[in-house]
């Protein structure tokens, strides 16, 4: 494979000309020989026919010309062959030249001993990123020159960041091979300790190197085997104090096995031996399933099921990684589409290799794949590692921007362990950071790692990115990273990667099933119960606040009963209810829907209790209960200690808008338990949602109604969010030569910052387009620190924060709501954000009602409105019973 320097423009000019391979010589030689024969035959013919003296005299000259041609061709061939065996940058041998130069190896004893040392320049990639390619090239050239000064040493550049030194020691009999090899490794590294000047300005750099050493007889019988063993030893050297390591005896055999797997992999892809497993991604705030990461496995016919570590690194050594990535991407998207058809509307994440980022048709192939399966682009998250970004930062930045422009999400995987600089991070415009498992796993025991996680979370949130904690292995770590502010959780604590056919059940699988009737029990049930009792005083002192929340929950859901209840050891105890009651009620925990919510720590929306015998009891209700939706209320450690529930005698699930707002209310209760002043937020939510329920006058024309709704949305959102200014913008109609349009125009605005709408419409089209394409909210705490905001927009907005929300208007041009604060906000309460999203969905429904006849109300069992959070029924049709009636002991 060509090195980076060989691919660099201008590298061929260093070599001094175009190389001539020996295989190209037969043609010119044949022509020269033919010319010689032709001249001789002509001379002979003329001599006999005319006795031509001139031809006889010309023949020796022609022979001299042919001889000169042959000599020149041979010289060029030799020079070309020499160039093919040398690295054009450093002028030392390349890998092929080193292998071709091999003389018999000395294996020690009474003979000479051949030792091979491989030098890896560990910081060369970082140097290319920070100082430029020329500086990194200069370091390699000077390092190679230093190594060539070793007597009897053969030096070669065997990779873009590695040199090899081959030395034959003729005094091997007196010293053990191990000591000789160790001495060679130390000597090689010592030669590179002194600083190297890498620029005309005299900038000195001390290279960080790792040296692996192997020797003949112990690690192989030819140079290829010794190079492989020494190369593997550099991995050990990188983690050692002295940065020098001797190869192990079995390293060469291990590398041969790896090469065998690498050779088999392309055929395995064609034969369909690969499998895709999926690991769940859970929302850290609500505990619900939000996505899955696709992880490849190889069902090897002889070696069994192989994990990605056994073959993905091998694929990355060649172009096989491109075929492998394309296969996984197609399989993951196909499975995601199948889940959507089965009522599990989650997203899927797929890893992209560095080689895949270099593919010219990557964006087009992703768009075609999503179009083929009719999936929204926002359901696909493409993950790239930090190390892949520094291979070609400019190319990576352009490709990731194009992928985001196509509507997909972009994530940086294993963040914190690679080479990404903060400058590059700002330029990349990614949606998500996945904190490396090494920090997550250590955070619970090491304060320094916890501080790093907190800092990364704060950094990502300020740059409008979500944070995923991968490698969450236990409940303790889970509670900690939730407290530190991560948004999404992934790890063995929740589920291991499983085949697709086993995955959908995870959406409703309890953490630890206790019995079919009492519901699941948390792994830390004792700690959860203790925390709930400890919060007793907070609950008691907050009765009025809890009742306000219940009243708002009832109004939002449109259901007659709303309750906040605490799940204790044996009973579920009402803390507040709407309608208000003077005496609190209780019900048995047995077969209570609230038990399932605190056991799974997830919201639960059951559209028809008559189809699911697991759930029958709900506190604070009497008479028939047909539908129930409950949301966990968590303590500061993330344990579900209480439940916010809404109940109805009519069957039917909640729509997305209502689930959003009710989830926000449950989060508000959780923040209240942590000591936040949430009463003010509830009053703002109540005012906004009550006003939002006012119908549009029927006499208004559709066009006037659109402006009326946009103005109402702007005013309600400003009041709700406490924003300085709000603008509702609509995309311009497309022209024949542009798509989707030439810009944006204002529908309505509100607030004390009239310049906000003009600035956004003048220079904020890019960020508005990004929200339109993704269909996702964008929260920007500080525009000056966000990669989503252009420098011109940040300069004109000044010290400000933005919240941009897509507004769903079926069949019409896209709308986006933009709210602005000055100065920017550090935190915006999730309940306010969710409620604002709900208002935007309400406006879309109102517009649809104006232009499309309303569908008749659904009766009986709810259909797709139940949402993805409804648990699958686990009873046979014969077990299903009519509407459940609560025990008479519960007061009305």
Image (cartoon, helix red, strand yellow):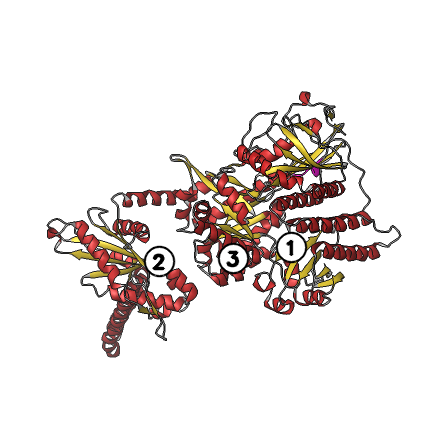
Label 1 residue SS? helix
State the mark number for residue 360.
3
Find residue 882 and report its image quarter: top right
Find residue 12 and report its image quarter: bottom left
User: Mark 1 or mark 2: which is in front?
Assistant: 2
- C-alpha span from label 1 to label 2: 40 Å
- C-alpha span from label 1 to label 3: 22 Å
Find residue 793 and report its image quarter: bottom right
From the image, tell me which residue sits under label 2: 122
Report the front residue among 5 and 836. Answer: 836
Q: Is any part of residue 813 visible from this angle?
A: no
The correct choice, above or below, for 92 with respect to 529 in the image is below
State the mark number for residue 676.
none
Magenta segment, principal secondary structure?
helix
> Does the segment drawn in magenta span residue 394?
no
Going from N to C along the chain, the mark reached first, 3 or 2, is 2
Going from N to C along the chain, the mark reached first, 1 or 2, is 2
- C-alpha span from label 3 to label 2: 29 Å
* Residue 657 horizontal side relative to residue 59, left or right: right
The quarter of the picture where the C terminus appears is top right
The part of the chain drawn in magenta is 863-867
Going from N to C along the chain, the mark reached first, 1 or 3, is 3
Label 3 residue SS? loop
In this rendering, the count of numbered labels is 3
The quarter of the picture where the N terminus appears is bottom left
Report the front residue among 297 and 427. Answer: 427
Locate residue 863, reporting x and y percent: 71, 35
User: Mark 1 or mark 3: which is in front?
Assistant: 1
Dots 3, 2 in contact, CB < 8 A: no
From the image, tell me which residue sits under label 1: 773
């Amino acid at each position: 494979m060509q090195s980076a320097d060989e691919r660099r423009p201008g590298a061929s000019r260093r070599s001094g000309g175009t190389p001539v391979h020996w295989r190209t010589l037969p043609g010119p030689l044949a022509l020269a020989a033919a010319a010689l024969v032709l001249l001789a035959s002509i001379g002979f013919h003329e001599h006999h026919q005319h006795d031509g003296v001139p031809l006889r005299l010309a023949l020796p000259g022609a022979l001299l010309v042919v001889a000169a041609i042959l000599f020149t061709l041979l010289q060029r061939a030799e020079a070309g062959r020499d160039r093919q065996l040398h690295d054009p940058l450093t002028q030392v041998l390349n890998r092929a030249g080193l292998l071709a130069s091999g003389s018999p190896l000395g294996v020690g004893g009474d003979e000479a001993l051949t030792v091979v040392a491989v030098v890896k320049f560990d910081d060369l990639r970082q140097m290319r990123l920070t100082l430029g390619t020329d500086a990194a090239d200069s370091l390699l050239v000077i390092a190679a020159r230093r190594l060539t000064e070793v007597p009897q040493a053969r030096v070669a550049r065997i990779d873009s960041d590695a040199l090899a030194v081959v030395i034959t020691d003729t005094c091997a009999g007196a010293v053990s091979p191990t000591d000789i090899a160790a001495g060679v490794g130390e000597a090689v590294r010592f030669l590179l300790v002194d600083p190297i000047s890498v620029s005309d300005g005299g900038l000195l750099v001390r290279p960080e190197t790792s040296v692996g050493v192997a020797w003949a007889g112990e690690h192989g019988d030819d140079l290829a085997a010794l190079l492989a063993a020494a190369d593997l030893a550099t991995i050990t050297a990188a983690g050692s104090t002295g940065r020098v390591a001797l190869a192990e005896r079995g390293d060469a055999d291990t590398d041969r096995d790896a090469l065998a797997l690498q050779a088999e992999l392309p055929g395995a892809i064609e034969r369909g031996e690969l499998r895709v497993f999926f690991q769940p991604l859970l929302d850290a705030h609500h505990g619900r399933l939000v996505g899955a990461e696709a992880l490849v496995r190889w069902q090897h016919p002889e070696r069994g099921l192989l994990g990605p570590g056994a073959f993905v690194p091998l694929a990355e050594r060649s172009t096989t990684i491109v075929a492998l990535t394309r296969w996984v991407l197609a399989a993951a998207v196909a499975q995601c589409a199948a889940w959507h058809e089965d009522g599990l509307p989650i997203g899927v994440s797929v890893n992209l290799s560095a080689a895949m980022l270099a593919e010219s048709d990557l964006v087009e192939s992703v768009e075609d794949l999503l179009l083929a399966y009719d999936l929204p682009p926002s359901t696909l998250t493409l993950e790239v590692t930090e190390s892949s970004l520094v291979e070609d930062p400019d190319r990576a930045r352009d490709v990731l921007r194009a992928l985001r422009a196509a509507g997909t999400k972009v994530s940086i995987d294993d963040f914190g362990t690679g080479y990404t600089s903060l400058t590059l991070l700002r330029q990349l415009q990614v949606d998500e950071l996945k904190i490396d498992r090494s920090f997550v796993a250590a955070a619970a025991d090491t304060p320094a790692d916890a501080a790093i996680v907190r800092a990364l979370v704060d950094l990502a949130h300020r740059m409008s990115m979500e944070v995923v904690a991968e490698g969450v292995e236990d409940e303790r770590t889970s509670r900690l990273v939730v407290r530190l502010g991560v948004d999404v959780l992934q790890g063995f604590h929740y589920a291991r990667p499983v085949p697709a056919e086993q995955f959908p059940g995870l959406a409703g699988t309890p953490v630890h099933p206790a019995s079919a009737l009492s519901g699941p029990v948390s792994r830390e049930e004792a700690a959860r119960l203790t925390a709930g009792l400890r919060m007793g005083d907070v609950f008691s002192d907050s009765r009025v606040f809890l009742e306000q929340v219940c009243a708002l929950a009832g109004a939002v859901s449109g259901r007659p009963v709303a309750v906040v209840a605490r799940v204790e050891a044996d009973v579920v105890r009402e803390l507040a209810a709407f309608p208000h009651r003077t005496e609190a009620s209780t019900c048995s925990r047995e077969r209570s829907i609230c038990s399932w919510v605190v056991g799974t720590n997830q919201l639960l929306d059951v559209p028809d209790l008559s189809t699911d015998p697991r759930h029958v009891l709900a506190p604070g209700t009497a008479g028939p209960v047909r539908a129930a939706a409950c949301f966990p209320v968590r303590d500061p450690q993330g344990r579900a200690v209480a439940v916010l529930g809404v109940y109805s005698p009519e069957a039917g699930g909640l729509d997305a808008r209502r689930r959003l707002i009710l989830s926000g209310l449950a989060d508000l209760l959780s923040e209240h338990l942590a000591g936040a002043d949430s009463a003010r937020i509830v009053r703002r939510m109540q005012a906004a949602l009550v006003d939002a329920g006012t119908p549009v006058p029927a006499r208004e024309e559709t066009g006037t109604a659109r402006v009326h709704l946009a103005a109402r949305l702007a005013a309600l959102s400003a009041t709700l969010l406490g924003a300085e200014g709000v603008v509702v913008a609509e995309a311009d109609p497309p022209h024949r030569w542009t798509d989707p349009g030439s810009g944006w125009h204002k529908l309505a605005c509100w607030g004390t910052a009239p310049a906000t709408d003009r600035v956004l419409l003048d220079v904020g089209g890019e960020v508005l387009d990004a929200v339109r394409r993704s269909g996702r909210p964008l929260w920007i705490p500080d525009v000056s620190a966000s990669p989503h905001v252009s420098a011109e927009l940040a300069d004109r907005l000044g010290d400000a924060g933005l919240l941009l929300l897509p507004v769903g208007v079926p069949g019409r041009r896209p709308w986006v709501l933009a709210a602005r604060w000055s100065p920017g906000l550090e935190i915006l309460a999730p309940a306010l954000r969710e409620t604002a999203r709900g208002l935007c969905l309400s406006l879309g429904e109102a517009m649809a009602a104006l232009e499309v006849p309303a569908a008749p109300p659904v009766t009986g069992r709810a259909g797709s409105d139940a949402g993805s959070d409804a648990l699958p029924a686990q009873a046979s049709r014969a077990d299903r019973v009519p509407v459940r009636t609560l025990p008479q002991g519960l007061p009305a």
